[in-house]
Amino acid sequence: MLNQKTIEIIKSTVPVLEKHGEAITTRFYQLMFGNHPELLNIFNHANQKQGRQQKALAGTVYAAAQYIDKLEAILPVVKQIAHKHRSLGIKAEHYPIVGKHLLLAIKDVLGDAATDEIINAWAEAYGLIAEAFISVEAEMYDEAASQIGGWDGFRSFVVDRKVIESDVITSFYLKPTDNKEIAHFLPGQYISIKLEIDGEKFTHIRQYSLSDAPGKDYYRISVKCEAGTANPDGVVSNYLHESVTEGEILKVSAPAGDFVLDTNKNTPVVLLSGGVGLTPMLSMLKTVVEVQPHRKVTFIHAAANSNVHALRDEVEALTSLEHVNSFYFYDAPTDEDWTNKRFDVEGYVTQDWMEENLPIQEADFYFCGPVPFMKAINFYLKNLGVTEDRINFEFFGPKGSLEESVKKEPVSV
């Protein structure tokens, strides 16, 4: 435990971290990767280039300073990040490297304001925080390796099938090359894929939600192809779409993630997705139908039109069941969509529509999609009086905030 003096010093830095947090974390990554370029084989290059990782880390450091005297308050955040770390292969030996460069960055950005007293206090505090992460992650590594079909690190899987689902989304069915059992997963979890791409200096690791129900002899991921390799996210997605073929071997982590469907509840469940955010939602839908056949579930998906609407047939196969409903929102329907009545609402999911059509007072809500879409859904749910314990969401990438201002104009997915 930290002494009271150290706690007071850390808490006194909260306003500074609120103002300069992203500058500190940006400098941190510059310093760390400059001295340890090998770590670029682990960290997501796209998140670095787009500033998402820096912002997420700044938020974590800020929260740690706020709650330094009661770190149990941020344990859910620790666990969420620890899932990512385990799926990437971050180990205890990486933490001293992170700590050293975080302190250097604080000193670099704050200059003389970062006194020896402040740096020493943060060094002590970081040791405590790192210990919490290392402990949680050690349990996760052990659980991943010791479960039936589990493993440590990355395991070889073959692309058994590659299926085009829409103009922008393709599914990959992955089976272990050793033909042994694979680890069970919870609906909503993801796996990491590690790729060595010709022409790229460093390894790329990306997380993809599992888009089918658990209990199969394969894992399925459904990947959106991002436009162009100039987009940092496009390097990996374009490679998967254009270069990875059936029969190719991929390195895969054991499933991870804390955004999971709670099957201990019997309340109605509403699953909302935008774009490729449907992947964890579909896994949840299939699971609830299988293990809780009498639980009421509503599946809502927003897309531009049917050309980019993936995996629709799999949802439709379930909507004939008495307790399953689906609604599709297209903001740019084609003539064919109009002719064949392939959508329910033209436009975007709105608060008024949700209030009129969903069991707002009883349901648990799960949603995933582009950040503007999720901000809007979160905003509507809060306005309608849905409590925090019934709101669940997943960021594709580093954790961000949904509490920032919501744009008034519609948001395309």
Image: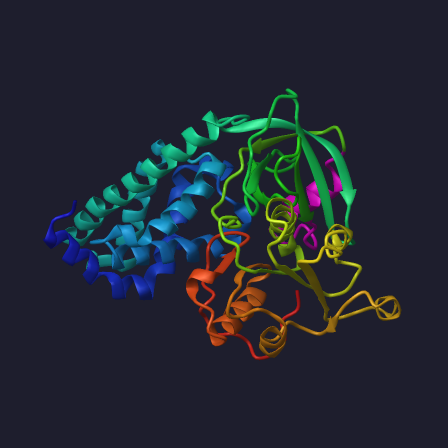
Q: Is residue 205 visible?
A: no
Q: Position of residue 128 (x, y in %)?
A: 24, 43
Q: How far from the left and from the top, in percent, is residue 290?
A: 64, 45
Tell me the quarter of the image containing the N terminus.
top left
Determine which quarter of the picture holds residue 24.
bottom left
Which residue is at the front of the view, 259 or 135?
259
Q: Which residues are magenta?
A: 224-245
Q: Could you say which is closer to the camera, residue 397 or residue 143?
A: 143
- Residue 60 screen position, x and y as percent: 36, 54
Vertically, is 243 above or below 399? above
Q: Could you tell me which residue is drawn at 76 percent across and 58 percent down?
A: 308
Q: Nearer the viewer, residue 29 or 323?
A: 323
173 in relation to 327, above or below: above
Q: Is residue 103 left or right of residue 412?
A: left
Q: Is residue 239 magenta?
A: yes
Expressed as whole percent of the image width and height from the top left, the position of residue 174 reads 67, 33
